[in-house]
Amino acid sequence: MTNIHLLQTATLLYSLAVFGYLLLIIFKRRWLQLTAQTFIISGFLLQTVCLLWRWKLAGFLPVTNLFSTLFFFSWALAACYLYFEIRYRIGASGLFVMFLNLCLLGIALQRDAELPTLVPALDTPFFSLHIVFSFLGYAFFAMAFSLGVLFLIQRYVPNQQLPRLTTLRKLNEESIFLGFALFTLCMVIGAIWAYWAWGYYFSWNIKGVWSFLVWLYYSGMCHAKFVRRWQGTGYALLSIAGFGVVLFTYLGIGLLLESNHPLE
């Protein structure tokens, strides 16, 4: 229950940050931005404590069911946002990505938070590395989705508190590239892990096929930024559509279809 209380407190802090960023867009006060950032950092630290606590109790990285994957996805997304905030000072742009973060936490808090047991095939360092790179990649793709939505809003309903279109385009491209690099590591480590556990690098199960499609889609996006007709609005739309593919691969397959990556 203490873990849940920490997570509920983090959710409250993220909610206050979203409200602060919303007020920042309307009233344009510097102190609102600093307050929202403080809420996000505090919430992230609480999530980190909760994650380490659960890790210690379980004896392994506890990311094996729907609650724990949503929780870890949320943690990775907050870390991704803080990376961009510290490096680029994107300010009120946090409204969109942190609202997405709240959606993840809101669903997670409705699920069973009990620590599951670990099956023997997962009891390997490859499991932890595969999960970490996978969800960090997902987080950067989610960040690109948020930046894509923000690009379209800024293009058609400009606001001085939001970054310029050129900045948003740059951040979107960087987010796609970093997500693709991390997801590539996830795929490579996953293949090594599969060979170590089952004797083959790749199988034609639906999760593996769709993961490859995600990798193929974002590899195409890494090239699309050099094609003039796909720059700007086109790239933003690709970022939004790509995250839909990610969500289906993560949630749709795990919840609706039979695979070797079930979510309960």
Image: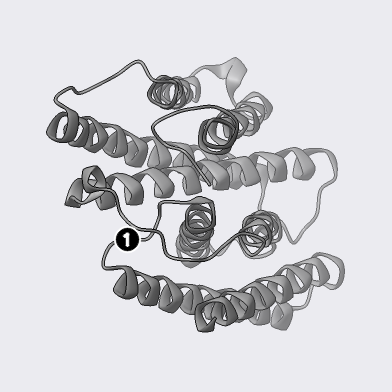
Which residue appears at 63% of the width and 45% of the height? 147
Which quadrant would residue 236 be assigned to in this image?
Answer: top right
Q: Which residue is mark 1?
A: 61
Relative placement, left or right, of 237 versus 134 is right
Which residue appears at 39% of the width and 22% of the height? 212
Above or below: residue 240 compared with residue 92? above
Q: Nearer the viewer, residue 43 or 3?
A: 3
Which quadrant would residue 33 be assigned to in this image?
Answer: bottom right
Return the x and y of residue 71 as percentages of the image width and height.
52, 60
Indicate the colouring scheme: one colour
Which residue appears at 67% of the width and 61% of the height? 110
Relative placement, left or right, of 218 versus 181 is right
Q: Nearer the viewer, residue 129 or 60?
A: 60
Return the x and y of residue 207 as percentages of the image width and height.
43, 27
Which residue appears at 59% of the width and 25% of the height? 231
The quarter of the image holding the N terminus is bottom right
